[in-house]
Amino acid sequence: MPAPLAQPGAERARAHRGSIAHAGSIAGQPATTIPLPGIATRPGRAHPVSMPTLSRHLIVDAPADAVWEVVGRQFDRVGAWATAIPRSAPILAPTTSAAPRQAAQSATSDAPVAGRVCHTGVRLVPLVTERLVAYDDANRTFTYQAEQHPRFLKTARNHWRVEAIDQRRTRISLHATVQPRGVLGWAAFLLLRVQLARVAAGFLQDLRYYVEHGRPSPRKQRQLDTSKR
């Protein structure tokens, strides 16, 4: 867990509140809500054929190594700081078939775990299993793909990058793609997107607080205290 850092000044705090950027369409594909915590944006029009792509960027007042320790090396411990994930656990078992297993081991040879299981607390999406498919500790990047995900999704993948701006500031970049499964998948996707956008905003707020203060946000701490009773 990173050591607590000094509180940012009012001017810097105001600048950072506007530092989350939403990218538009990429290669002609529309940006839209991604049904996983932390990678959703405001509701937009979905396209029934193309695979939606989304990019987000967040600047935090914390050293890059401390941020990477939280999101990369402690990938499976997201439940320790994200209110949207009441609890999480590591995946230790390899993928089932030989070819995917060899490819995954090559791309994730320095990963701390194979992936994570997230308990979301959301009735329609109670459990999400996310497996690392690429992990580069030296360059602070990783990519994970949802395996045990809602049935209305065909694929869901997310790429993270952590970059140092200077000794005390870090840019966190997320690039996600998702493909709903058929017409019913798109219908479920559209029904959930508003709720998931709210969850995602809280997810990033929790991440900012955790890496800047070295402890869970007040609302996450209340959740942890409640679970111990």
Image (cartoon, rainbow, N blue to C red):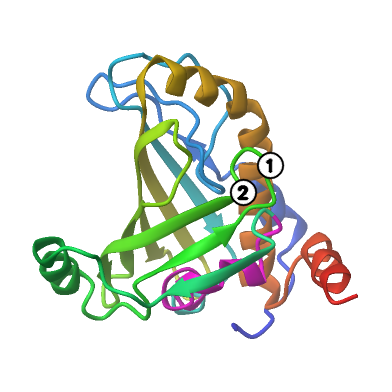
Q: Is residue 55 left or right of residue 187?
A: left
Q: Amino acid at mark 2?
A: Pro
Q: Residue at x 36, y 26 (%)?
A: 181
Q: Secondary structure at mark 1?
A: loop
Above or below residue 88? Residue 56 is: above
- Mark identifier at residue 146: none
Q: Residue furthest front?
A: 96
Region in magenta: 67-83
How far across and how far down the image is residue 218, in percent? 83, 65
Q: Nearer the viewer, residue 162 or 19?
A: 162
Q: Amino acid at mark 1?
A: Arg
Note whether residue 67 is visible.
no
Q: Is residue 69 magenta?
A: yes
Q: Is residue 166 left or right of residue 60?
A: left
Residue 152 lies in quadrant: top left
Above or below residue 61? Residue 109 is: below
Note whether residue 19 is visible.
yes
> Where, quadrant-wise, is the C terminus in this rendering?
bottom right
- Distance from the alpha carbon under mark 1 to that under mark 2: 5 Å
Q: Main secondary structure of the magenta part?
A: helix
Q: Secondary structure at mark 2?
A: loop
Q: Residue at x 45, y 18 (%)?
A: 184
Q: Nearer the viewer, residue 92 or 215?
A: 92
Q: Which residue is mark 1?
A: 123
> Where, quadrant-wise, is the N terminus in this rendering?
bottom right
Q: Nearer the viewer, residue 50 or 94?
A: 94
Q: Which residue is mark 2?
A: 126
Q: Is residue 99 left or right of residue 84?
A: left
Above or below residue 172? Residue 226 is: below
How far across and how far down the image is residue 22, in percent? 48, 34
Q: Residue at x 53, y 55 (%)?
A: 59
Q: Are marks 1 and 2 in contact (CB under 8 Å)?
A: yes
